[in-house]
Image (spheres, rainbow, N blue to C red):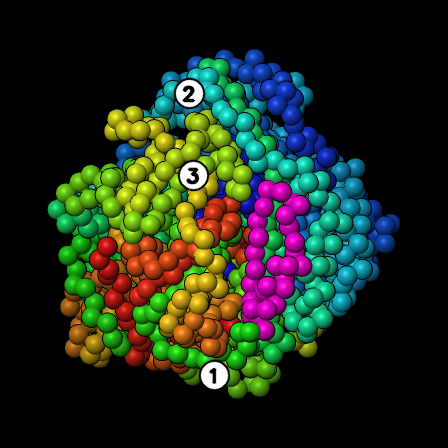
Amino acid sequence: MGAMMMPAIPVTGNPVAPEAMTGRMDAVVNKRLADAALNAARSKGATYTDVRIGRYLNQFIITREKQVQNIVNTESFGVGVRVLANGTWGFAATSDVTETGIARAAEQAVAIAKANSKIQKDPVKLAPQKGYGEVSWKTPIVKNAFQVPVAEKVDLLLRANAKALEGGANFVNSQLFQINEQKYFASTDGSYIDQDVHRIWPNFSVTCIDRQTGKFRTRQALSAPRGMGYEYLDGRPDGKIAGPTGTGINGYKDSYDMVEDAAAAAKQAKEKLTAKSVEPGKYTLVLDPDHLGLTIHESIGHATELDRVLGYEANYAGTSFATLDKWQGKNFQYGSKIVNIFADKTQPGSLGAVGYDDEGVKTKRWDLIKEGVLVNYQATRDQVHVLGENESHGCCYADNWSSVQFQRMPNVSLAPGQAKYSVDDMVKDVDKGIYIAGRGSFSIDQQRYNFQFGGTLFYEIQGGKIVGPMEDVAYQSNTQEFWNSCSRICDESDYRLFGSFFDGKGQPGQVSAVSHGSATTRFDNINVINTARKI
Amino acid sequence: MNNGPGQLLSSNQSPTTNNEKMAILSQDQAKAIMQNALRFSKADECEVTLTGTTGGNIRYARNSVSTSGADDNTSLIVTSFFGKKSGTATINEFDEGSVEKVVRRAEELARLAPESPEHMPMLGPQTYKPSVSYFQSTANINPDFRADAARKSLEPAIAKNITAAGFLEDAASFQAKMNSKGLFAYHRDTGLTFSVTMRSADGTGSGYATGDYNDAAKLDTGKLSRIAIEKASSSVNAKAIEPGKYTVILEPAALVANTDASLIGALMNSMDARNADEGRSFLSKKGGGNKLGEKLFDERITVYSDPLNTEVPTSTWAGDGRQREKITWIEKGVVKNLYTSRFWAQKQGIKDIPNPANFIMEGGTQSVEDMIRSTKKGILVTRLWYIRPVDPQTLLYTGLTRDGTFYIENGKIKHPVKNFRFNESPVIMLNNLEALGKPQRVGGNLVPPMKIRDFTFTSLSDAV
């Protein structure tokens, strides 16, 4: 489906006290419990079983202007058992995390698999996977956000709000999302994997209103959700990357200054009220990484999910134009020669980084598009045989112990350019262009051909220079045409991660978090529409 | 707004054994548990909410079942207040010790919490009309029922060499609320939602059908699947026509969705008084204030909510305990009411109206076929997809047609057309009204098919 598709914050699990959120599950106990499930499923006829014991902790702090609106602490604890029986998947889950409860879930999973096997056409073909024994992995955080006092986090949000109000904002809403997934995985392959995964997302929206005209404009935060601890909020000066000369924009790399960004947001939201309305037509677009990430996500990330390509998502999110024949032909020019897109589950600080996926596969990096040509997809253990491979890509994920794991997008990123180009080099020889920063409106069709994106901040480029802010901008294109119009990419020094915290997919719906890296990138001759209307 | 089972289910939407705990409690059973919890409270005010859901789902794709599961989940939520400070804790065990523990935890959290300047004292006793949204036929659904429903959808597809992908989800649930000021509320509900996408073997045609009900006896997956098959067959080899402004006939599934954002859903979700008063809504007025009482739409547009409507029944009370009654939002094109939080209603001295759980848009008697017959030149849109806001100021949305779009000429469907991207505002659209047809249920609401002139398509899509 799409990034941030969840209309409301998907609060799952039970509210708990903040002090209950810093402990860890006991791996010894988990191993004993997992073995109970593996044995129970085997005795009922399963040929393969995996067990995920999960403790999912969320803390969401929500404020507006000078006040805290809500602090939500939730914990969800339970176990999911997936089995193969008669060549068919079965899954059951329980919050009764005892040997008896888990064994009962395992038996139910086998019963479901056997019942469903009667109407199944193609038996599951599972890629072989070696067992890793007892191993563990942890997000390399410096400061556990759950151990930072709530009062300190509230203070940061209220300081950011105050800065925006001082700067003339009429309204400011800010949030801090923190997630800790403690996952213990075991399978009949002989793996016992203990993982501790952390994610964080500081965010705000600042609104300025012109009462006379009735016009209002909102500027979103330029932060990215990250696979990091509270150190992301340290606001180190070396974490900043300046936008093109004349914009005054600061982007952020591995350290975010929320208070500074809120001050800038108020100023820019006010500017938006009187900015020039765009003349529709063809423009050269220079896209900031905090904007381009969403375009990568929708037009490449989802299009190269193998389950979509095969038709498993046809009734909901849709299928994909990137069909198997295009990959088999080895010459489908997805983008221009400088477009190199890689999938990755290992990059430190990214949302997708884990040691092992939710079916016990060690994670890795691989190419999806090489020199513009489609070369691979994203696949799980039961899909890779379609690609003639016998090793999973390691991108299986479930959003909860109670959800069945399935193929979810790894980090999908655009490799930075080889030639040395700065952000100003992207602008300097553009006659008629627009620089776009930040996330905005997004929509793409069910096969990922036609898309339309807005943004947070728009600046007009004329004669190689930024000449001022613009408004009412959205660009429409076709995925293949758009990526083939990619003409220049900044070098590695500008490479940053964009993130989507609540990417929705599947029926019943599940969310996942994923990052997209890129450097500032230029696209030529793109159709821009004016979105202003009168009602 | 969307009260289909997708909304009723908790996070545990997969097969859970969960000790087969409590399932659907009667009013008396729920009352006993909540009275017991309130007995432990030492807070200034205490509110207890008890919810339970039992349900399941089946999913298929590529003409074969892919996943299925069942769910059973019951939770007790306790919120304690000390002055303007509140804390909430939840538990899914109901023995005496566990219930006392959860009350104590809520009190600990309340003491640690910052004061809320928007705190409102709890409501006292309320009178609610009994809801009519629970059907035993739905509560009785079992795995065999779901498998049979899927089989009835798959068989006609396989017979016609069409590829089916579908999803059925059902739930029975109850919600109960009690507080230390004497409020008690209880509601039970059942619902199921079915959707299916049929694609031609060559991948050039696609059709969709959906249905949602409180009463499982109304579900006919075979009939809906045949509609989707017909759309898939008749939409193969679509021709491209130029984007631009067209007269369109929008079927109800193009106006409201079961699972995703929609144009009419977006309009109804934007009728909040606070946003309007604060100056950040399409209902905000130049110079301050809101557009309550103004005529913003064609005079044939009337929208109301009614929790006791037998076609789309829902709860007669809102999550905060306020009564939900029949209320008109738009009458003959005039904005009649806006919903609001209790805090904002008190601050502004305005009518205190909770947000709606369903909406009913009045229509006429014409069928979609009648509307086609009276159209000289136009486009039939059966579904819109990936609808996202572009400009909240004007409620401008973008999205695409999907799963069957057809060119109409001289009262007849001439041929399928390639999908379009649109950029349109429901406010503009409901001023460009040509005709309204007979309302149908979608996403727990009643919406008529509509004929709209000058609907704005801005580009073409190759997607099928």
Q: CA distance from mark 2 to mark 1?
A: 63 Å
Name the amino acid type tagged 3: Ser
The boundaries of the magenta stretch are: B206-233
Image-based side of A218 in relation to A351, left or right: left
Circle 1 chain: A
Q: Secondary structure at mark 1?
A: loop
Name the amino acid type tagged 1: Gln
Crowding around mark 2 (Cα neighbors within 10 Å: few <14, some 14 to 19, many 20+) is some
Name the amino acid type tagged 2: Met
Q: Nearer the viewer, residue A489 or A302?
A: A302
Q: Which residue sits at x=63%, y=62%?
A: B225
Magenta stretch holds residue B211: yes
Q: Which residue sits at x=60%, y=79%?
A: B202
| Same chain for the residues under marks 3 and 2 in the image | yes
Expressed as whole percent of the image width and height from the top left, the position of residue A424 reads: 24, 71
Expressed as whole percent of the image width and height from the top left, the position of residue A243 reads: 26, 64
Residue B122 - label: 2
Q: CA distance from mark 1 to mark 3?
A: 52 Å
Whether residue A521 appears in this view of the structure is: no
Q: Nearer the viewer, residue B150 or A335?
A: B150
Q: Is residue A115 above or below residue A465?
A: above
Q: CA distance from mark 3 to mark 2?
A: 25 Å
Where is mark 1, residue-wise? A333
| Same chain for the residues under marks 1 and 3 in the image | no
Where is mark 3, residue-wise? B305
Image-based side of B51 in relation to A217, left or right: right
Q: Secondary structure at mark 3?
A: strand
Q: Is residue A345 above or below residue B276?
A: below
Circle 3 chain: B
Whether residue B339 appears in this view of the structure is: yes
